[in-house]
Image: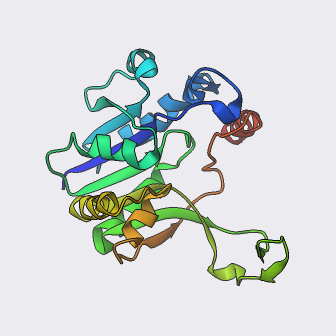
């Protein structure tokens, strides 16, 4: 099989309250983007890695990651548009593996498990069971429901899809002017089931300043 990983790195550091990309911050002596990309370089089932990046960051990103299997594409102003820009550079492949560049602690075993499930089901995503009791509220802030926690997962990445299936979903979303913040939503939009793969709570997303020391502590442990 020919499988391509897309690592999303075109986001800004607005919630970090920094001017540069948060993926250029260091964790344990390496930048966030280096750790995220290296996790996929070690997977034998992945043949190519495409990193989406802001135009102002491409020089610095490419100086950090020098591997012949890695290429860079300018991202869009939304997640879906960034993935689309990467997809348009792929002639053909079997699976695409989409991962947030801001999740540098993804484990190889979780990547491999998700790829295996996607081979069987066409779509799979890694996630973790919700630990807290979840409440649904109405527009006035009052609780109206308490879902069964045993059926709830917090979705992470990677999310892995049959390439032809993903392109079909992307085309439908564009035709209907839909823009999703999660790739599973895109696949669900065309009625395709997504297999959930239980992953690791350590696969955190670097979003705020507090996440940096947390990631450092996870690495140390």
> Residue 140 location, x and y as percent?
83, 71
Work out whether residue 36 can be spotted: yes
Residue 119, image quadrant: bottom left
Question: Where 100 sits versus 139, above or below?
Answer: above
> Residue 34 location, x and y as percent?
48, 29
- Residue at 31% of width from left, 38% of height from top? 49
Question: Where 37 sits versus 83, above or below?
Answer: above
Work out whether residue 42 can be spotted: no
Q: Could you tell me which quadrant the C terminus lies in?
A: top right
What's the colour scheme?
A: rainbow
In the displayed image of the protein, which residue is found farthest to the right?
A: 142
User: Residue 52 vs residue 86: left or right?
Assistant: right
Q: Could you tell me which quadrant the N terminus lies in?
A: bottom left
- Residue at 64% of width from left, 48% of height from top? 204
Question: Where 164 sits versus 30, above or below?
Answer: below
Q: Nearer the viewer, residue 209 or 198?
A: 209
- Residue at 60% of width from left, 50% of height from top? 203
Residue 40, image quadrant: top left
> Residue 62 location, x and y as percent?
38, 20
User: Residue 124 vs residue 3: left or right?
Assistant: right
Q: Nearer the viewer, residue 56 or 151?
A: 56
> Residue 188 location, x and y as percent?
41, 72
In the displayed image of the protein, which residue is found farthest to the left?
A: 91
- Residue at 25% of width from left, 58% of height from top? 167
User: Residue 2 vs residue 83: left or right?
Assistant: left
């Amino acid at each position: 099989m020919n499988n391509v990983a897309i690592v999303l790195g075109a986001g800004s550091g607005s919630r970090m309250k920094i001017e540069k990309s948060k993926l250029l911050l260091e964790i344990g002596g390496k930048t966030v983007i280096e750790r995220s990309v290296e996790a996929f370089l070690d997977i034998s089932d992945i043949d190519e890695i495409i990193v989406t990046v802001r135009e102002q960051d491409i020089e610095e990103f490419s100086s950090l990651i020098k591997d012949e299997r890695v290429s860079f594409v300018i991202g869009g102003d939304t997640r879906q548009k960034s993935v689309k820009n990467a997809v348009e550079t792929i002639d053909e492949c079997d699976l695409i593996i989409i991962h947030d560049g801001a999740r540098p602690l993804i484990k190889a075993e979780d990547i491999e498990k998700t790829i295996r499930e996607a081979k069987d089901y066409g779509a799979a995503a890694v996630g973790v069971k919700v630990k807290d009791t979840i409440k649904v509220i109405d527009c006035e802030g009052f609780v109206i429901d308490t879902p069964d926690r045993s059926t709830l997962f917090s979705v992470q990445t990677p999310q892995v899809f049959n390439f032809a299936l993903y392109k079909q979903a992307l085309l439908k979303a564009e035709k209907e002017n839909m823009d999703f913040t999660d790739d599973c939503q895109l696949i669900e939009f065309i009625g395709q089931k997504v297999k959930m793969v239980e992953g690791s709570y350590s696969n955190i997303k670097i979003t705020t300043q507090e996440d940096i020391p947390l990631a450092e502590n996870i690495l140390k442990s």
